[in-house]
Amino acid sequence: MINNDWERFGEEIRRTIQDAVDNQDFRRLNQTVSDTVGRAMDAVSDGLRNGGWYKGPGEGSASRAENGQQTKGSAAGGFAQGVPRAGAIKSRAKMLYLRGTAPKVGGIFLAATGYVFGVASLLVLFILFLIGMKTGLELGIRIAGGLLGAAAVIFAAMAYKGTGMVCSVGRFRNYVKVLGTREYCNTEELAKKTGRTVKAVVKDLKKMIRKGWFLQGHLDDKGTCLMVSNEAYAQYTALMERMSKEKADKEAAEERQRQEYEKLSPEVQNIVKAGDDYVRKIREANDVIPGEEISAKISRMEMLVDRIFDRVEENPDSVDDIRKLMEYYLPTTIKLLEAYEELDAQPIQGENILSSKREIEKTLDTLNIAFEKLLDDLFQDTAWDVSTDISVLNTMLAQEGLTEDGLKASGNKTDRK
C-alpha cells in the first residue's frame, strides 16, 4: 500500500511540473506540489497512528516460519503475529514496548521520497535553467525555479526526518535486545554494547520515552539507569527513599555522637580517641591473620574493647576503672597480635613457632574473659540503680495493696467482715 502511494504521489508531482513547463504556467505549481506533499505526509502519519513497531522476543522471521500463518501481505502491514514460544515473556513485552513496523516503513518512505524527489527537483531546476538560457523566458523560469527550490527544501527535510526515524528504530531495537527479559539496565551497559556514548544513549532514551516507545519507561535522575516497567521504577524509588532515610539517620547519629563527644572533658576525649585507635589496630590484625578459630577470638576482642570505650563515653565517671586497661592490657594485646602475625607469616612452621602461637591463642582467651569482666563491672552502677528502682517500686506497690501478697491480704480482710 505504501509503495503504491509513493508511486502515485511521485507521478502527480512529475506530471504537475511537466505541465507547468509545457504550458509556461507556474501559478498553481507551488500549491499543487504542496498539496501532494501534504497528502504524502498524512499517509505516513496514518501509518504511525495505526501501529507501533517493536517485535517481541521470539517474533519475526523465525516465528512466522514456525506457525505458517502469515502471508507476505500481512508481514508488510507492520505487525508480527507469530505464535509465541514463551508466552509470558512476549505478553510482558507487549506491555513494555511499542509494537509493529509502521514507523520504520514510514521513515523509509519519507527518506526515499525526500531523496528521490529532492534529486528530481534539482534535475528539473537544471533543465529549467537550460530552457531559460535557450528561450529567454527568464521570468517564468525564475518563478518555477523558486517554487522547485522550495519543494527541494521540503524534500530534503523529509529525507532528513525519514533517515532519523529509521536510525532511531534500529537503535531502539538494539536497546531492547540488550535488555532482553530484564526490566532495568545501566545506560553505561547500553552504550558499551551498542557502540555509542553514554550521553548519546541517554539523549536517545529520553526521546524514546517521551514518544512512548518505552510504554512504561523511566530514567533515574542522573541518567544512569533505564527502567522499562512501573514495577521496576517503584522498587527503585522505594530503594532510593530507604537509602536516603538511612543516610539521614546515620548523619543524625554521627552528629549526636559528635555533640556528646564535645561535651566530654579533654582527658576523656583523649582516652576515647586512644581506644578507637586500639580497636582499629585489633581489626587490622584480624584482617591479616588467617584462620577461622583465631579470627573468631580477635573479633570478639574487638567487640568487647569497642563496647568498653562506648561505655566510658556514655559514663565518663568510669574512666578511672580502665586505667590498667589503657596502661597495660591493651598495649600487651597489640604486641601479642603483632607477634602472632609475624610467627604465622613464617614459611616453615616448626614446633617452637606452633607452640608460641598456641600460647598466644590461650592468652587471647584469657584477655577476652578479663575484658568481659571489666565490661560487666562498668555496668555495676547501672545494675545498682536498677535494683534500687525495682525495690522502691515494689515497696510502693505493696503499700497500695497492688502486689499479689497485698491483694491476698485485702481479700482476707473482706472475708472476715
Image (cartoon, rainbow, N blue to C red):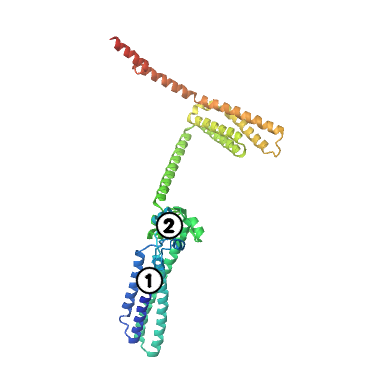
Q: Which residue is mark 1?
A: 2
Figure quadrant of the C terminus:
top left
Q: Nearer the viewer, mark 1 or mark 2?
A: 2
What's the residue type where badge 2 is placed? Pro
Q: Based on the displayed image, in which of its 4 quarters is residue 401 positioned?
A: top left
Residue 251 shows in this picture: yes
Residue 294 versus residue 311: which sits nearer the camera? 294
Q: Position of residue 324 (x, y in %)?
A: 58, 26
Quick check: 417 left or right of 47?
left
The amino acid at mark 1 is: Ile
Q: Is residue 218 at all visible to an observer of this figure? A: no
Mark 1 vs 2, N-terminal side: 1
Q: Is residue 399 above or below residue 150?
A: above
Q: Which mark is residue 84?
A: 2
Q: Is residue 359 above or below residue 52?
A: above
Q: Residue at x 34, y 67 (%)?
A: 46
Q: Are marks 1 and 2 in contact (CB under 8 Å)?
A: no
Residue 140, percent from left and from top: 34, 85
